[in-house]
Amino acid sequence: MHGHMKLWAAMVMAAALAAAPPLSFAAEDVAKALTKDLTAVIALLGLPCGQVVSATPRGRNDYNCVCKDGNRYRVYTNAQGRVVAEKQ
């Protein structure tokens, strides 16, 4: 249960950073923070990635991610409130 709370916190943080007003961060800084957070989420789930190089939002707390090593994942929060990464 504790591990899922860390993942949820990372996703909430990523969503909060993505929704930050444009004056508080440059768009590049927000994108960097989001990819860093998604990299951490994927790593905490024990999946190979290395580093997320791009993330495309699909919805709230739902992203398509491309990793440096070529892996692609959909990272989202499921109906039970758990963070899931599905290999694409």
Image: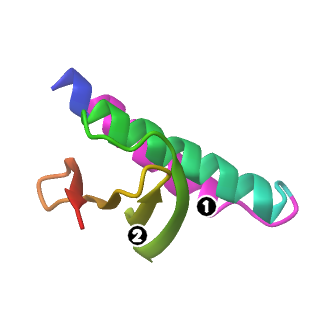
Q: Quadrant of residue 66?
A: bottom left
Q: Residue at x 24, y 67 (%)?
A: 88
x, y percent for residue 43:
35, 34
Question: Mark 2 is on which residue type?
Answer: Arg
Which residue is most to the top? 2
Total marks placed: 2
Please, what secondary structure does the residue beneath circle 2 have?
loop
Alpha carbon of mark 2 to alpha carbon of mark 1: how far?
A: 10 Å
In the depicted view, which residue is nearer to us: 5 or 28? 28
Magenta segment includes 82: no
Q: Answer with left or right where residue 43 lies relative to residue 35.
A: left
Tell me the tag on residue 18: 1
Question: Mark 1 is on which residue type?
Answer: Ala
Magenta segment includes 16: yes
Query: Contact, CB < 8 Å: mark 2 with mark 1?
Result: no
Q: Answer with left or right where residue 16 lies relative to residue 48.
A: right
Q: Residue at x 68, y 51 (%)?
A: 32
Q: Quadrant of residue 1?
A: top left
In the depicted view, which residue is nearer to us: 23 or 63? 63
Identify the residue position indicated by label 2 in the image: 60
User: Counting residues from the N terminus, which is met first, the one under dot 2 or under dot 1?
Assistant: 1
